[in-house]
């Protein structure tokens, strides 16, 4: 009984995907629209894309920019967020700045950045960096703020300096919250990656997608959408594995089965 | 009710070793004022002076809001007083240090560390080698009755067990003074009693100086050599009562002792007065 329930829980996301594809297939057959291929047609186009060397280079270039943008953003945002969470002065300085940047769609900044830095890798990576930074800073900030004062006092009594307390108490104590921010950041990295390539069409997964759109190859367009979606699912599943390992010690909490891990 | 005299005779004679007591902590004229709003200041502590002898178990007793925890935080160096000073062994306290080990009501364990990792943290920070720190920590974990739980994370432990870990973690770096801030306040009555007994057993072995904040009268009388009764708004010392009960103390004997009972009744009456009237200004 329990194993059956467990099996159901594991299989549920698979059923959801199959259901979505089936609905797509039915809708497409019913509408008979050229720009809306059936699910089967779109899936058939996937091997063509993944088998093409040019396309693979494009997709890998996208992933590389995304990895760099995400990595640099995390490395800068976590320390900044933690400092803001523990120092009123730092928070008072950065909070208004971040509040101004937060609601601006990062892609909207692209034309300006393109003027300054061109249409190359730097521009796109910078946009990904901006997209990832804010949620990571915000969650690190909240996590650091919530660290129990008495825990820091205990550390101080053992002889930890303020800097040591930040690295060895605030950082691990806030880690569950920080990783929640990183997970949001990862999804945003993927979104900004595609949007940046949509605006600065030169290479990348977004470039393949919009070129196909221009040429009316709708099966390729939808195949790329599936590929990008699958990349999102895979990255999130990998991240969730790592996260679960790192914060095994934290309180069990209700987690929506949003990933396939 | 007739009071049954104790059958045990060994604890009737005074057994406290008559070492010349020297002051380890001196609190002089400490006041603490918190700004609660722009117009109003809250005087948490008003002109507190208190001397604590080395090796003494001193409880600070009082109603909530009398500043008893704040006084403990001043000694811990976690809070600096608005005026006055606190000294340990003649040195003015300017911040926290490993000579004063806190144990908090909230446990404040490091949740990402196992029981062993928590207890080893202090000695490792003090530069004790890993193998040595581990051996000492394992012995301490056994002493507080948690053998077999070395690799558990705090979230897997009950409140009483967490507080045992917290005590072991603090004892592990050999502070000269234990600062206990209502350590058993969050525990159920039974667990509380067991931890009081165990704390007393541990304390009677090495007689570390203990400053113990509580709002429980019997806890204070049962554990202490001295009870400092505080009154509220502003926080002041109302009276210091010497608890002249012999050691080692055993709960089953003590509860039947008329002297213990008189202390409890007297201090409870004083507590009621303090709660009704606050500090006479």
Image (tube, coloured by chain):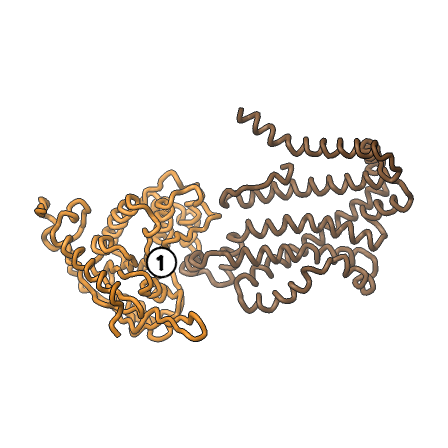
Residue at 35% over, 65% down: B70
Residue at x-position 42% and y-position 51%: B109
Residue A133, position as x, y percentages in the image: 66, 57
Compared across the picture, whether B271 is left or right of A64 comes to left
> What letter labels the chain drawn in orange?
B
Q: Residue under circle 1? A: B101
Q: Residue A32: x percent and y percent?
A: 87, 34
In the picture as drawn, the residue positioned furthest to the top comes out as: A1
Q: Against B154, is A84 above or below? A: below
Question: Could you tell me which residue is drawn at 45 percent across and 74 percent down?
Answer: B38
Residue in front for this viewpoint, A195 or A261: A195
Q: Image quarter for residue B15? A: bottom left
Residue A82 location in percent, x, y?
56, 59
Local SS, label 1: strand
The reply, left or right, for residue A204 in relation to residue B197 is right
- For residue A240, what is the image quadrant? top right
Residue B125 image position (x, y, % from top left) = 44, 56
Q: Does residue A90 sit above or below A134 in this rendering?
A: below
Q: Nearer the viewer, residue B71 or A31?
A: A31
| Image quadrant in which you'd find residue B207 | bottom left
How would you rate the neighbour count of disc 1 (Cα within 10 Å): few for under 14, some for 14-19, many for 20 or more?
Answer: many
| Residue lying furthest front | A30
The residue closer to the viewer here, A5 or A46, is: A5
Question: Would residue A52 be visible to someone looking at this image?
Answer: no
Question: Which one of the lettered chains is coloured brown?
Answer: A
């Amino acid at each position: 009984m329990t194993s059956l329930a467990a099996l159901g829980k594991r299989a549920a996301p698979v059923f959801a995907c199959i259901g979505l594809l089936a609905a797509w297939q039915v809708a497409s057959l019913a509408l008979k629209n050229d720009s809306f291929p059936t699910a089967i047609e779109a899936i058939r186009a996937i091997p063509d894309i993944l088998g093409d060397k040019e396309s693979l280079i494009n997709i890998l270039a996208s992933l590389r920019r995304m990895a760099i943008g995400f990595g640099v953003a995390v490395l800068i945002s976590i320390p900044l967020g933690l400092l803001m969470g523990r120092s009123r002065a730092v928070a008072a300085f950065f909070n208004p700045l971040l509040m101004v940047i937060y609601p601006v769609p990062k892609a909207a900044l692209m034309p300006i950045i393109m003027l300054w830095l061109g249409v190359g890798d730097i521009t796109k990576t910078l946009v990904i960096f901006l997209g990832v930074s804010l949620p990571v800073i915000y969650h690190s900030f909240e996590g650091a703020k919530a660290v129990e004062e008495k825990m820091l006092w205990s550390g101080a009594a053992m002889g930890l300096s303020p800097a040591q307390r930040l690295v060895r108490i605030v950082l691990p104590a806030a880690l569950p919250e920080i990783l929640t921010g990183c997970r949001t950041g990862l999804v945003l990295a993927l979104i900004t990656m595609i949007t940046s390539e949509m605006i600065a069409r030169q290479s990348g997964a977004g470039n393949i997608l919009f070129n196909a759109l221009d040429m009316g190859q709708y099966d390729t367009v939808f195949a790329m959408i599936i590929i990008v979606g699958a990349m999102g699912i895979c990255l999130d599943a990998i991240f969730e594995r790592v996260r679960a390992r790192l914060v095994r010690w934290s309180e069990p909490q209700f987690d929506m089965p949003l990933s396939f891990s | 009710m007739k009071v049954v005299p104790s059958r045990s005779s060994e604890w009737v004679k005074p057994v406290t070793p008559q070492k010349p007591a020297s002051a380890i902590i001196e609190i002089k004229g400490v006041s603490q004022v918190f700004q609660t709003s722009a117009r109003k200041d809250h005087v948490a502590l008003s002109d507190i002076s208190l001397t604590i002898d080395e090796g003494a178990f001193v409880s600070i007793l009082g109603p909530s809001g009398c500043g008893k925890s704040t006084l403990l935080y001043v000694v811990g160096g976690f809070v600096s007083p608005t005026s006055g000073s606190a000294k340990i062994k003649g040195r003015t306290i300017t911040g926290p240090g490993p000579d004063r080990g806190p144990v908090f009501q909230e446990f404040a364990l490091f949740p990402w560390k196992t029981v062993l990792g928590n207890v080893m943290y202090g000695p490792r920070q003090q530069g004790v080698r890993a193998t040595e720190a581990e051996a000492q920590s394992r012995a301490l974990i056994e002493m507080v009755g948690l053998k077999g739980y070395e690799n558990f994370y705090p979230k897997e432990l009950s409140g009483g067990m967490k507080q045992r870990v917290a005590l072991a973690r603090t004892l592990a770096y050999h502070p000269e003074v234990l600062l206990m801030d209502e350590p058993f306040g969050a525990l159920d009555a039974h667990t509380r009693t067991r931890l009081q007994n165990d704390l007393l057993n541990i304390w009677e072995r090495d007689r570390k100086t203990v400053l113990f904040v509580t709002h429980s009268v019997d806890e204070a009388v049962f554990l202490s050599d001295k009870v400092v009764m505080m009154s509220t708004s502003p926080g002041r010392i109302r009276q210091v009562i010497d608890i002249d009960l012999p050691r080692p103390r055993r709960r089953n004997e003590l509860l039947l002792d008329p002297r213990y009972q008189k202390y409890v009744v007297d201090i409870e009456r004083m507590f009621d007065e303090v709660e009704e009237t606050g500090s006479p200004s």
